[in-house]
Amino acid sequence: MQTSTQQTEKLLKEYTAIAATYDRRWSAYLDASLSMTLEVVSDLPATRVLDIACGTGLLLKSLAERVDHPELVGIDRVPAMLDAAKENIGKQATLLEGEAENLPFDDAGFDLITSTNALHYFPDAIAALQEMRRVISPSGNLVITDWCRNYFWMRLLNRLLPWTQHAHVHTFTTAELEHQLLQSGFKVVGKTRKKIDWFWGLMTVHATPV
């Protein structure tokens, strides 16, 4: 099993190499996964939003178009991805380098927290979810979209990727993620999963603090 430091090094190497072409290379996948997140968050109240593992800032860019103009904050471990995010969204969001397991924010500061296509990379998912619980407001909403191991190809990918140099850690089923959220001080209020093409199977889980 790889250590947290080894996983971080792999992630930095992998995503630094593809940051400049990431949006074009994965456009269909990104459009579909972001759409799943936006279907949930579009109707949720938000004055201060945190996007964890924000990548190139595509979700933040969409959220910047909301009529209520929430304050937007994005955090990511990969400086090259943050550089791409700055090009995508300019000054519409505050972008910070950091890890989901150690968020540099005060308690209860965000009423909407999102994370898309990232949970399977977190070295310690429970620690990350507990940090999300710490920084979310008592009436806030958490929306996570990620790979879903309920689907065959995602189960296979989960077995194969650890044997490569890929930074992958673990892909959850919907039931596993719900259990992790409950352990971290959340209750699940909505969940959906679907195939976005012949290969990718994704889930979106909506939770609130308890």
Image: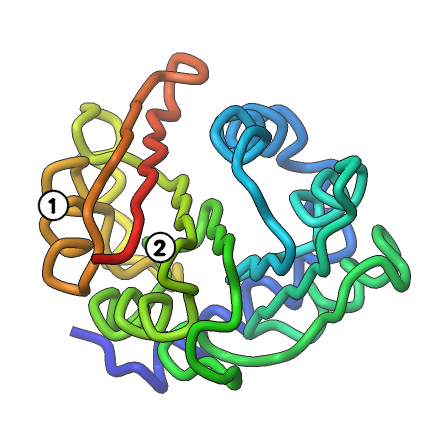
Q: Quadrant of residue 134?
A: bottom left
Q: Residue at x 62, y 24 (%)?
A: 28
User: From this viewpoint, is residue 159 visible?
Assistant: no
Q: Residues within 10 Å of mark 2 (few under 14, many from 20)?
A: many
Q: Quadrant of residue 29?
A: top right
Query: Hey, what amino acid is under mark 1?
Result: Glu
> Could you say which is closer to the camera, residue 5 or residue 132?
132
Residue at the spot of label 2: 119
Q: Residue at x 34, y 58 (%)?
A: 168
The kind of secondary structure element at disc 1 is helix
Residue extending farthest top: 198
Q: Quadrant of residue 26?
A: top right
Classify the position of the N terminus by image quarter.
bottom left
Residue at the spot of label 1: 176
The kind of secondary structure element at disc 2 is helix
Q: Residue at x 35, y 82 (%)?
A: 6
User: Residue 132: which disc?
Assistant: none
> Could you say which is closer to the camera, residue 32 or residue 111?
111
Query: Hey, what amino acid is under mark 2?
Result: Leu
Q: Earlier in the sequence, mark 1 or mark 2?
A: 2
Residue 138 image position (x, y, % from top left): 36, 62
